[in-house]
Amino acid sequence: MGLILVAALCIPAVLVLGLVVFGIGLYNGLVKLKVLVDEAWSGIDVQLKRRYDLIPNIVETVKGYAKHEQDTLTKVVELRNMAMNSNAGIEEQGKLENQLTGALKTIFALAENYPDLKADQGFRDLQKSLTDIESEIQGARRYYNGTVREYNTKIAVFPNNIFAGMLGFKAREFFEADEDERENVKVDFTSEEAKA
């Protein structure tokens, strides 16, 4: 009788202890992944700041050679300011960054129409710096999306989804390229009169 009572008390205690250990492990794992996602976003943010800092130099260099392309340059500056000052979520920030990337591609496509600009060493250096930064942004984006994928998967699988919801862990958004960014930039230098 005493052995049965001890077994009857030990089994629930072991189950409760197992649930507590599982809960602690799950919570710590989710916190670790959340910190990795935040750190990955910080990496993107650093690269975006580098790009924002470089854009005024590019615009000023292009202005000297392509004075009648003012609309394109103004659009780049406006998009830069909108992206830099945005407090939007990751999805909206991604859209702004994709628009800015497209506008920057247009500036570099303009250089093809201005041989003096294309030959300018300062412009070429700025273009190389931007290319390097864009490459870093892509790497940071891949790392961020990988950590988001791992985090989202962990909170979505059973039984983690039950506990993750109770503990306040929510899925994070991916920082994705939109369809426009996946295509090559189309630049048309023909005047409006020639098109008509």
Image (spheres, helix red, strand yellow):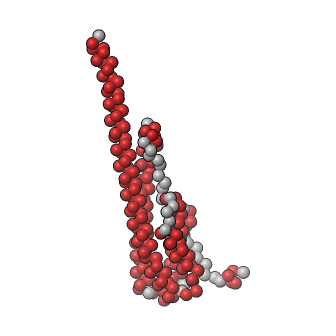
Q: Position of residue 139 (x, y in %)?
A: 40, 63
Closest to the observer, 59 or 102: 59
Q: How many marks?
A: 0
Identify which residue is drawn at 35% across, 24% down. Answer: 12
Is residue 97 among the parts visible in the rendering?
A: no
Closest to the observer, 151 or 195: 151
Residue 132: which quarter of the image? bottom left
Q: Position of residue 68 (x, y in %)?
A: 58, 86
Quadrant including the N terminus: top left
Q: Is residue 97 above or below residue 1?
A: below
Q: Position of residue 114 (x, y in %)?
A: 52, 86
Q: Is 145 left or right of 178, judged from the image as shown?
A: left
Quadrant including the C terminus: bottom right
Q: Is 28 left or right of 120, judged from the image as shown?
A: left
Identify which residue is drawn at 54% across, 79% down. Answer: 73
Is residue 175 among the parts visible in the rendering?
A: yes
Query: Residue lying furthest left in this view?
Result: 2
Q: Is 94 left or right of 34, judged from the image as shown?
A: right
Q: Is residue 165 above or below residue 89?
A: above
Query: Residue lying furthest right in this view?
Result: 196
Identify which residue is drawn at 39% across, 61% down. Answer: 42
Closest to the observer, 26 or 85: 85
Identify which residue is drawn at 44% across, 87% down. Answer: 120
